[in-house]
């Protein structure tokens, strides 16, 4: 399979996964919007919320990194700069969700 085809399939699959996760997150964000800090932390310390938030972060960063790499390929003409930008972006799209998930799983009331 061609690399561009794989990217296209991953983009479509991740966007389909993001739709219910974003709906869940928006509904819950509205419900905890005016709550106290303790209520918000207790929301994020429940097991389903930890898992779904982590999944949302991972899929969202995966989706955005694929889209940004397409922008790099279209608008950066220097191959070395394009490779550095892609590798930096991919590294950050792994490190940032990983650190965020660690923080979420270490939240305590």
Image (cartoon, helix red, strand yellow):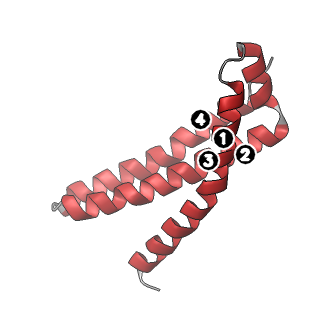
Give residue 106's position: percent from left, percent from top: 74, 27
Q: Residue at x 76, y 38 (%)?
A: 49
Reading the image, the residue beneath label 1 is 25
Whether pointer 3 and pointer 1 mark residues with C-beta atoms closer than 8 Å, the reply is yes
Q: Residue at x 25, y 58 (%)?
A: 82
How many neighbours does mark 4 have within 10 angstroms: few (below 14), some (14-19), or many (20 or more)? few
Relative horizontal placement of residue 109, taking residue 15 as reference (left or right): right
Return the mark for residue 99: 4
Q: Marks 3/2: CA distance?
A: 10 Å
Whether pointer 1 and pointer 4 mark residues with C-beta atoms closer than 8 Å, the reply is no
Q: Marks 3/1: CA distance?
A: 5 Å
Q: Marks 1/2: CA distance?
A: 8 Å
Give residue 56's position: percent from left, percent from top: 63, 47
Whether pointer 4 and pointer 3 mark residues with C-beta atoms closer than 8 Å, the reply is no
Relative horizontal placement of residue 33, taking residue 11 as reference (left or right): right
Q: Secondary structure at mark 2?
A: helix
Reading the image, the residue beneath label 2 is 52
How many neighbours does mark 1 have within 10 angstroms: few (below 14), some (14-19), or many (20 or more)? some
Q: For marks 1 and 4, give the one nearer the viewer.
A: 1
Q: Residue at x 49, y 56 (%)?
A: 63
Q: Marks 1/4: CA distance?
A: 19 Å
Of all residues shown, which one is farthest toward the bottom?
Answer: 1
The quadrant the C terminus occupies is top right
Kindly indicate the quadrant of the structure image that contains residue 97.
Answer: top right
Relative horizontal placement of residue 41, taking residue 14 as reference (left or right): right
């Amino acid at each position: 399979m061609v690399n561009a085809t794989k990217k296209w399939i991953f983009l479509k699959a991740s966007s389909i996964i993001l739709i219910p996760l974003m709906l869940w997150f928006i509904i819950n964000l509205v419900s905890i919007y005016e709550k106290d800090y303790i209520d918000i932390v207790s929301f994020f310390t429940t097991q389903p919320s930890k898992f779904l938030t982590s999944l949302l972060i991972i899929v969202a960063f995966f989706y955005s990194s694929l889209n940004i790499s397409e922008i790099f390929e279209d608008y950066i003409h220097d191959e070395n700069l394009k490779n550095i930008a892609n590798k930096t972006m991919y590294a950050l799209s792994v490190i940032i969700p990983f650190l965020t998930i660690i923080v979420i799983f270490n939240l305590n009331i």
